[in-house]
Image (cartoon, grey):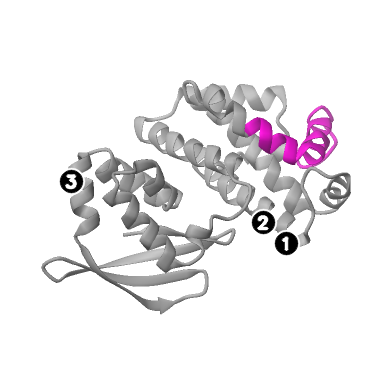
């Protein structure tokens, strides 16, 4: 059974991030030979890096100029993970090796081309957002200390709004939040309106701790209250809903 594109994209991002964190917890550089041996016996690490490769192929095919924009960060990410990726590339050519779902064979590429050609406008926009996040992943070497807690993430996000720094604001959001907030707010409002929005929040309080999820209430000028949710992923807290 084929994996739907929307699920593939979601798993690719989540899995690729998990692979980076798994390597960090082991205290092993992903580019080392020792890691290659570990990855060979750790299907989670191997499969999650494979998902990142699969997603990049989708982005290269479906998003204009993505390959050019991602070239430098991808090259560095590939070098950090070189031995694991080489193992995957050897498996690509072997029909009987590894899980077929994660092999980037010529047939798989052909299937991706057909999928990209048949995307709806909404699916294409979602793919663009996911591919932008993939570039962030390739560029990321360590967790961002500015996103190490919900409070720090919120402060970073507000600072970005006040500076009309759209790129920094987007980095504080999960994929789903990016799709909603980016297109409805960040791309619609002028710099001045973004600054006004950033200055309109007067209070912030964590109201519920659900482990990897935190709920908070924010108060705007005029005493209007709203809920906001944060999600922990790879040691970074990002806004998942607001």
Residue 45 position, x and y percent, is 74, 51
- Circle 3 Cα neighbour tier, 10 Å, few/some/many (<14 / 14–19 / ≥20): some
Indicate whether residue 94 is drawn in magenta. Answer: yes
- Identify the residue shown where x is 52% and y is 69%: 212
- Magenta residues, start to end: 74-101
- Identify the residue shown where x is 71% and y is 57%: 24
Residue 178 position, x and y percent, is 38, 47
Task: Check the picture and name the quadrant holding the N terminus.
Answer: top right
Secondary element type, mark 1:
helix
Circle 2 is placed at which residue position? Answer: 21
Q: Does the magenta stretch mainly form a helix, a strand or a loop?
A: helix
Secondary element type, mark 3:
helix
| Quarter of the image where one finds residue 216 | bottom left
- In-front residue for pair 153/1: 153
Residue 172 position, x and y percent, is 42, 53
Circle 1 is placed at which residue position? Answer: 25
């Amino acid at each position: 059974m084929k994996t739907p594109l929307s699920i593939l994209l979601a798993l690719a991002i989540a899995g690729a991030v998990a692979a980076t964190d798994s390597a960090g917890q082991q205290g092993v550089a992903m580019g080392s030979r020792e890691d290659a041996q570990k990855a060979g016996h750790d299907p989670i690490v191997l499969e999650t890096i494979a998902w990142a490769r699969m997603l990049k192929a989708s982005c290269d095919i479906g998003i204009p100029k993505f390959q050019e924009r991602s070239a430098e960060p991808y090259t560095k990410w590939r070098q950090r993970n070189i031995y694991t990726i080489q193992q995957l590339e050897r498996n690509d050519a072997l029909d009987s090796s590894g899980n077929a779902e994660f092999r980037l064979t010529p047939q798989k590429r052909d299937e991706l081309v057909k999928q990209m050609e048949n995307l709806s406008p909404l699916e294409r926009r979602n793919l663009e957002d996911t591919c932008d996040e993939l570039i962030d992943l390739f560029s990321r070497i360590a967790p961002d200390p500015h996103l190490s807690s919900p409070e720090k993430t919120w402060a970073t996000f507000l600072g970005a709004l006040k500076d009309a720094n759209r790129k920094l604001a987007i980095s504080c959001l999960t994929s789903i939040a990016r799709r909603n907030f980016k297109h409805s707010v960040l791309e619609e409002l002028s710099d001045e309106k973004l600054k006004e929005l950033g200055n309109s929040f007067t209070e912030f309080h964590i109201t519920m701790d659900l482990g990897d999820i935190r709920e908070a209430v924010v108060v705007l000028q005029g005493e209007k209250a709203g809920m906001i949710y944060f999600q922990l992923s790879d040691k970074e807290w990002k806004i998942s809903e607001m």
